[in-house]
Image (cartoon, rainbow, N blue to C red):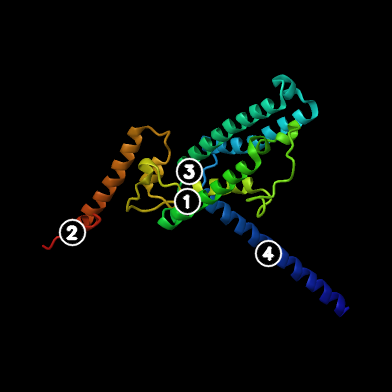
Amino acid sequence: MSFQRLWLGCCRHGHAGFLQSSVLAAEADLCVMTWLLGYVDPSDSSFVAAILAIAFNPLYWNVVARWEHRTRKLSRAFHSPHLACYALGGSILLLNLLRSHCFTQAMLHQPLAEGLDHPAAYGLGLALLGLGSMFVLSSFFALGFTGTFLGDYFGILKEARVTTFPFNILDNPMYWGSTANYLGWAIARQPHGPAADCGSGPHLCGRCPVRGALHHRDLPAESLQALQEKLTGDQALRGAEQGPAAAWGSCPGRAAPVP
């Protein structure tokens, strides 16, 4: 009987511990999502366009290449598998340019993490850009145009497997290089336009209130000017209520006058 009670007690404590750990995990996930949403605006149209471009490009070239491998319709349409491969490669390059443009616009419209506004972060971003570009360009020169842009699906095969740099250190150097390029560009990008103003006012979600308002570029200029005047007017009004010395001392870089 005592053994049964002990077993039931262990089950109850184990169940309670499991529920408590589940609640703590859910709270941790919520904190992480709240932190991420402070730096990402998923409702921004440029962010949605970047996500769609990133997802569409590999879907496009894989579907088209597999369709060509089954039907050979592109090769017959261009009367040459090489010309068909060049056409597909050209369309992929144009889509990559569009993806890069959408990615850049999304970065310019998203908040900038405070830790990235630092020379060390800028240097890290440049280093990643250099490393990624090296992998992408060296892969392209090693494979050639048709080898890079799915020439094997058009029946254009190389005589032997490419084992030179960078394929002797990575299996997919072009994918890793592209990832490093976009990550480096995201880290190295600097504050853009009026949003680069890092005022000394109180911060909200890691940003100055004026900078946060200027972050939304769809707002008219009149509303932004009125908001800035309201904020500066409130600061001056608080200084006037506290006295001339406090009002003078509230200005950055100025000491209160000696009476």
At label 3, counting other C-alpha atoms closer than 10 Å, the crowd grade (few under 14, some 14-19, many 20 or more) is: some
Q: Furthest-left residue in view?
A: 259
Mark nearest the camera among 2 and 3 is 3
Residue under label 1: 126
Dot 2: element: helix
Looking at marks 1 and 4 on the same chain, the residue that comes earlier in the sequence is marked by 4
Q: Position of residue 108 (x, y in %)?
A: 45, 41
Q: Amino acid at mark 2?
A: Ala
Distance between the alpha carbons at the discs numbered 1 and 4: 42 Å
Q: Which mark is residue 110?
A: 3
Mark 2: few, some, or many residues within 10 Å (few <14, many ≥20)? some
Specify whether 97 is left or right of 170.
Answer: left
Mark 1 and mark 3: Cα distance apart in space:
20 Å
Number of the front mark, 3 or 4: 3
Tell which of 150 and 230 is nearer to you: 150
* Residue nearer the viewer, 18 or 141: 141
Q: Secondary structure at mark 1?
A: helix
Q: Give whichever of 112, 150 is nearer the camera.
A: 150
The residue under label 3 is which amino acid type?
Gln
Q: Residues within 10 Å of mark 4 (few under 14, many from 20)?
A: few
Q: Which residue is mark 4?
A: 21
Q: Are marks 2 and 3 in contact (CB under 8 Å)?
A: no
Name above or below for residue 21 compared with residue 211: below
15 sits left or right of 25 in the view: right
Q: Secondary structure at mark 4?
A: helix
Q: Which residue is mark 2?
A: 245
Q: Quadrant of the C terminus?
A: bottom left
Task: Name the kind of residue labelled 1 in the image.
Answer: Leu
First in sequence: mark 1 or mark 3?
3
Q: Position of residue 135 (x, y in %)?
A: 59, 48
Q: CA distance from mark 4 to mark 2?
A: 54 Å
